[in-house]
Amino acid sequence: MAQTLYAEVKDRLIKGRSVADYRIQAAYALFIQKKPDLAVQFIEKAKKVADIYLVKSFIPLEKELLSSLEEMLEEEKSIISLT
């Protein structure tokens, strides 16, 4: 299901430069592709543009979502290093 949905929006996400675009790509890289290093790259890009999000009231939410994603990324890295 996730691969199907991602395939439908992939081109728009790649062209997009918003915090949400990068956050979605980071989550996909982490949870579906199992590529934590790629997820880190997208998270870093998202952080750089987080304060210029078009919908100003969403900025705190996006930052919170990025923080949660970083925590999940660290957990995933811990699991990988244990195996």
Image (cartoon, rainbow, N blue to C red):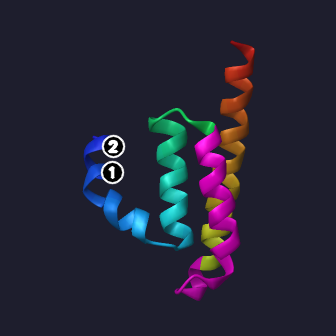
Q: Disc 2 on helix, strand or loop?
A: helix
- Kind of residue sitting beneath label 1: Tyr
The secondary structure making up most of the magenta span is helix
Which residue occupies the foreground of this view, 61 or 10? Answer: 10
Against 82, residue 63 (above or below) is below
Residue 77 image position (x, y, % from top left) = 70, 30
Q: Is residue 57 magenta?
A: yes
Q: Residue at x 67, y 22 (%)?
A: 80
Give the number of the mark in front: 2 or 1: 1
CB under 8 Å between callouts 2 and 1?
yes
Q: Is residue 61 magenta?
A: no
In the rendered image, the quadrant that contains the N terminus is top left
Q: Which mark is residue 6?
A: 1
Quadrant in the picture for residue 61: bottom right
Residue bearing mark 2: 2
Which residues fall within the magenta stretch? 37-58
Residue 29 image position (x, y, % from top left) = 51, 43
Q: Residue at x 69, y 22 (%)?
A: 79
In the rendered image, the quadrant that contains the C terminus is top right
- Kind of residue sitting beneath label 2: Ala
Q: Is residue 15 left or right of residue 41?
A: left
